[in-house]
Image (spheres, helix red, strand yellow):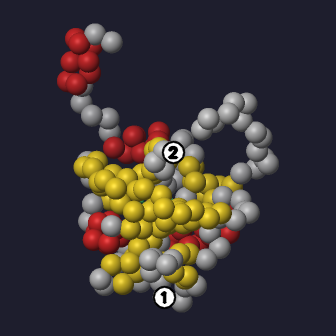
Amino acid sequence: MSGAAVGQRAEQPSCDPARFREVMGSFATGVAIVTTTAGDGPHGMTVNSLTSVSLRPPLLLVCLTRGSRTAAAVMERGEFVVNILGTHQEPLSDAFARRQEDHFEDLEVQTTREGLPVLHAAVGHLVCRVSESHDGGDHHIVVGEVARVASVEGTPLIFHRGKYDSLTGRGRDAAFDWYW
Ligand SMILES: Cc1cc2nc3c(=O)[nH]c(=O)nc-3n(C[C@H](O)[C@H](O)[C@H](O)COP(=O)(O)O)c2cc1C
């Protein structure tokens, strides 16, 4: 692309946020809850901005909204757990998306050897150390180095066009060796 074309693009107004959100909604994702513990106790929030970044070293990222209690706690603690949700955990996803509530009351929680909360019955767990955080507009882009993982059999919860969904097929093997 030429320099002029790039310059022309830069002058265009930004896309409408609501339309951006709507179109991004067609990019189906899984759903996870980021948990951590800071000085004032356990915190957690529902996310679908989870992305794997690197295999060596194993890195992932999550985008945490500025001003959220969990984002502050993750930054303070420097460690967090990603709990990947199964289809049966839709109510948990809703609960951890509600602000200003004690999400951990009456909840079955285990703790890692670091003392981080782990949500029972999730289909996958990744214990992470914050390796970097970046400015991402109204979100913090938090890069975590993955220390340990665990997974159990189960169907993942899907989020698509603002609604929960589930996989209808049984899936098929990729036609290439990914992460070669
Ligand atoms: C399916 C789903 C996905 C979400 N993904 C994100 C996300 O990736 N990043 C984010 O900052 N908030 C996301 N949210 C909103 C947060 O879960 C919500 O604002 C949360 O209550 C903020 O955490 P706090 O209670 O610690 O302040 C999502 C909500 C839902 C229902």
Residue 52 location, x and y as percent?
A: 49, 47
Specify the farthest residue to the front. 56
Q: Is residue 154 left or right of residue 108?
A: right
SS state under label 2: loop
Q: Residues within 10 Å of mark 1 (few under 14, many from 20)?
A: few
Which quadrant of the figure has residue 121?
Answer: bottom right
Residue 164 location, x and y as percent?
A: 60, 58
Q: Type of residue at label 1? A: Glu
User: Which residue is painted at 27% across and 34% down in the image?
Assistant: 14
Which residue is nearer to you in this view: 12 or 171?
Answer: 171
Mark 1 beta carbon near ligand 1 (under 8 Å):
no
Q: Is residue 156 above or below residue 42?
A: above
Q: Type of residue at label 2? A: Leu
Q: Which mark is residue 105?
A: 1
Residue 49 at least partly seen: no
Residue beneath disc 2: 55
Q: Is residue 129 above or below residue 143?
A: below
Q: Which mark is residue 130?
A: none
User: Which residue is painted at 32% across and 35% down in the image?
Assistant: 15
Q: Is residue 111 left or right of residue 74?
A: right
Instruction: Using the numbered discs, state the Cα–Cα distance from disc 1 to disc 2 in whole angstroms.
Output: 36 Å
SS state under label 1: loop
